[in-house]
Image: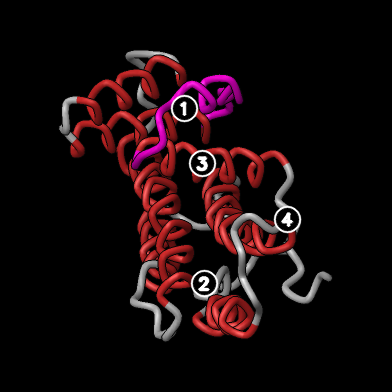
Amino acid sequence: MSTPPGEYYTDERWQNWIDRIDEEDVDPEDEDSARLLLNLQDDTAIAVAKILTDYEDGTIDEETTLGELAGVREVVLSEINIDDEEKLMLIDGVQTSLVCVFYAAEEYVAEGVADDASVAEYVEAAADAEAEEDLDAALGYCVQAGTRIIDGDELAIDVAEDIEYGLVSEWVNGLDSLQTALSDPEVVEEDDE
């Protein structure tokens, strides 16, 4: 059974997560808080994975796929209205991680799989570009790595661990969520305690 267009991910679904984060005491050092933020990220990655799966199955065409991805991106990357600055920063981190997921999915659908290097090589090139403060190139390499992950290549965990903390590590974190979602697209329950 396919998901009707516009129903892969909704404003309401995203807002439920935001409300939950707003209501709870969130401490990134605390395991439950960290899991809540990861679930927020994974839930979005699962929606992207479902769109890509329906595209690959021929359930939706390229134009519809790109439209659905844009719709989810618009919901997830919209401005958040929370008064707590620390929570805003944490959600911003999740949004940053997901930027690369959306671009990689769109690139995969529109242009296909990047085939000049392996996932690890693209990630290393991205880290090098970030070190040189060429963030556009860094994002481009991460997006190319993402197209390979969508195509079935694996992002090895040790690749991610070797990267200095920064935008590339955030983007790779998002790609890791996408990889997990593609291999096991189970819905993250919002009220899972």
Task: Work out how far the residue at label 2 is from the one at label 3, CA to CA, in angstroms.
Answer: 27 Å
Task: Work out how far the residue at label 1 is from the one at label 2, CA to CA, in angstroms.
Answer: 25 Å
User: Which residue corresponds to mark 3?
Assistant: 173
Tag 2–tag 3 contact (CB < 8 Å): no
Q: What percent of the width, then of the height, locates residue 167?
A: 34, 42
**Left or right of residue 187, residue 63 in this image:** left
User: Which residue corresponds to mark 1?
Assistant: 148
Q: Residue furthest right?
A: 193
Q: Which label sits in the foreground, 3 or 1? A: 3
- Residue closest to the eye, 66 or 48: 48
Answer with mark 4 or mark 2, whichever residue precedes in sequence: 2
Q: Which label sits in the foreground, 4 or 3? A: 4
Circle 3 packing at 10 Å, graded few (<14), some (14-19), many (20+), is: many
Query: Residue 37 lies in what quarter of the image?
Result: bottom right
Circle 1 packing at 10 Å, graded few (<14), some (14-19), many (20+), is: many
Q: Which residue is painted at 37% across and 52% down in the image?
A: 99
Q: Which residue is painted at 54% across and 82% down in the image?
A: 15
Q: Which residue is painted at 78% across and 76% down in the image?
A: 191
User: Which residue corresponds to mark 4?
Assistant: 31
Badge 1 amino acid: Arg
Badge 2 amino acid: Pro
- Residue closest to the eye, 34 or 15: 34
**Left or right of residue 126, residue 16 in this image:** right
Answer with mark 2 or mark 3, whichever residue precedes in sequence: 2
User: Which residue corresponds to mark 2?
Assistant: 5
Task: Work out how far the residue at label 4 is from the one at label 3, CA to CA, in angstroms.
Answer: 17 Å
Answer with mark 3 or mark 1, whichever residue precedes in sequence: 1
For label 1, the SS is: helix
Badge 4 amino acid: Glu
Circle 2 packing at 10 Å, graded few (<14), some (14-19), many (20+), is: some
> Magenta segment range?
151-167
Residue 159, above or below 72: above
